[in-house]
Image (cartoon, grey):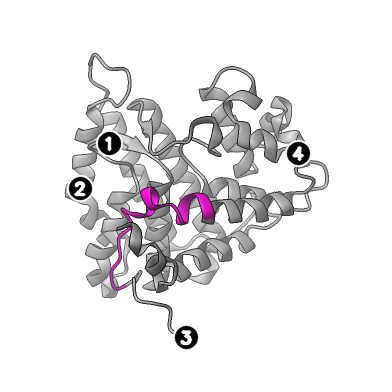
Amino acid sequence: MVSDMGKWKRSQAYADYIGFILTLNEGVKGKKLTCDYPVSETVEKLMSLLGTLDRWIDETPPVDQPSRFGNKAYRTWYSKLEQEAETLVSAVLPEELGAAAPEVALYLKEAVGNSTRIDYGTGHEAAFAAFLCCLCKVGALRVEDQLAIIFKVFDRYLRVMRKLQKTYRMEPAGSQGVWGLDDFQFLPFIWGSSQLIDHPTVEPRHFVEEKVVNDHHQDYMFMECIKFINEMKTGPFAEHSNQLWNISAVPSWSKVNQGLIRMYKAECLEKFPVIQHFKFGSLLSIQPVKP
């Protein structure tokens, strides 16, 4: 209920979730996607899980239907995930943590969009971050996995989500149109701007230039997001992505990063339509933070 929003902001789940986002934000500061980092067995297993979701898209082509958006074949794809989610998660977890699979799998099912509305938005993205946060809480992912969590796992997740969005023409969930940051994602802009902090040559004003985006998208998540927007949308950037256009006027990446974190809290974590679907359990608890 709307009246529960205060309870959510004071909850252990909120503290754990935002703490997880900010810890990763700190970890990727100034680092390229292509830098060296350790890749653990759990990370490899997560990559294989995402590879399975990707393969299922190829096996479930869109169907012919009168309406352009929201291809119903997505529901067929989604029902596979619903049936298999626990098995997929069990394969990622070490044997002794198997009991956590049903709870962790819930977040995975929430992370790929809504099968009734055939839409996807920042609430689904938050469920994937919560999924990763739970894997950290149970000890399947560790501190040394920090860079791999974003540069490998989250990056792969984004690619699979973009493929879903394109293949099934998913609607943006709760989109604010040109007044939102992006139709589908938010977190890669936060972490991507952190990667660019203190960059010797690229400043925020440069990301609206196509050449800069093409030169740097392999190294920086932020540029990869801009590249995807440029591919999907037509017309002047200032018109279809007004908020991002405004951000290009901010003098430094650290200011962009701080501003995006504030915006994320206000526009996603404190908005009832986004949070009303958030799941609570023993790992991400609605209980108030212990003093």
Residue 129 on image: x %, y %: 43, 56
Q: Quadrant of the N terminus?
A: bottom left
Residue placed under numbered mark 4 in the picture: 249
Distance in Å between CA atoms under marks 3 and 2: 38 Å
Q: Position of residue 229 (x, y in %)?
A: 55, 29
Name the N-terminal-most of marks 1 and 4. 1
**Residue 280 horizontal/vertical position (percent):** 30, 65
Q: Which mark is residue 291?
A: 3
Regarding mark 1 in the picture, which secondary structure is present there?
helix
Question: Residue 56's mark?
Answer: 1
Q: Residue at x 44, y 67 (%)?
A: 9
Q: Which residue position holds label 2?
A: 82
Residue 141 in sight here: no
SS at mark 3 in the image: loop
Residue type, label 1: Trp
Residue for point 61% across, 50% down: 260
**Which residue is at a point 43% across and 52% down the rendered structure image?**
271
Q: Closer to the N terminus: mark 3 or mark 2? A: 2
Q: Which residues are magenta?
A: 266-282
Amino acid at circle 3: Pro
When asked about the image quadrant of residue 289, the answer is: bottom left
Q: Secondary structure at mark 2?
A: helix
For residue 288, which numbered disc appears in the image?
none
